[in-house]
Amino acid sequence: MAVCTEFTDLFVALAREKGIYARELQGYGYSTKQNIRPLSLVTDVLHAWPEFYEPAQNTWIQVDPTWEDTSGIDYFTGFDVNHIVFAIHGKSSTTPLPAGFYKTGATKDIEVTIASDKPVENPRISVQADVPQAITASSFKDAHISVRNTGNVALHNLTLQLKSKIHSNECPRHSCGLPCPL
């Protein structure tokens, strides 16, 4: 039977072999399900899981093949927030040293408590647009639109719609009711 370190090492090795940047994360994994609950709840044994770099999204994506294997839950296409990172191992597989590296006895020194109250969700989106006032059919104009999430929750699959104040039947140059060529 493999443990989290072996799953992580194998994932990182296979990803790097294919030219994908990957690294090991060490930290705390929490679950209310007894069959996948990590040892860090009763000892200071930390959990390890990998992440890989996705250049198209310009971000690191965490996966957990250990929990995928032991629980059957898909931790590749969707990840939870119950994984808390204490150390990231990139070029070196041993440094930085994770919490608890200094242990000499069988004591429990790391304590992580999961809050039972859910925080109040406060989504906030701010949009700044620098769009030219007039755009004609024969001209090209640059427009800059910045969408920023300043709230405390992640927002997914949002759609950005641009609308003009002038509609085809309100065009000041045409009264035919057809779509305005401008």
Image (cartoon, grey):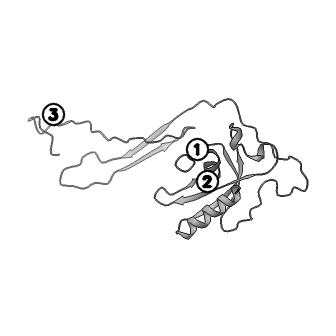
Q: Which mark is residue 65?
A: 2
**Mark 2 or mark 1: whose residue is earlier in sequence:** 2
Residue furthest to the left: 176
CA neighbours of label 2 inside 10 A, class few (<14), some (14 to 19), many (20+): many
Q: Which residue sits at x=21%, y=35%?
A: 167
Distance of label 3 from label 2 (alpha carbons): 57 Å
Q: Position of residue 96 (x, y in %)?
A: 74, 62
Q: Which mark is residue 150?
A: none
Image quadrant in which the N terminus is located: bottom right
Q: Amino acid at mark 2?
A: Pro
Q: Amino acid at mark 3?
A: Asn
Q: Position of residue 46 (x, y in %)?
A: 75, 52
Q: Which mark is residue 73?
A: 1
On screen, residue 77 above or below 31: below
Q: Position of residue 119 (x, y in %)?
A: 63, 31
Indicate the secondary structure of the residue bearing disc 2. helix
**Mark 1 or mark 3: whose residue is earlier in sequence:** 1
Mark 2 and mark 1 residues within 8 Å of each other at the beta carbon: no
Indicate the secondary structure of the residue bearing disc 1. loop
Q: Which mark is residue 169?
A: 3
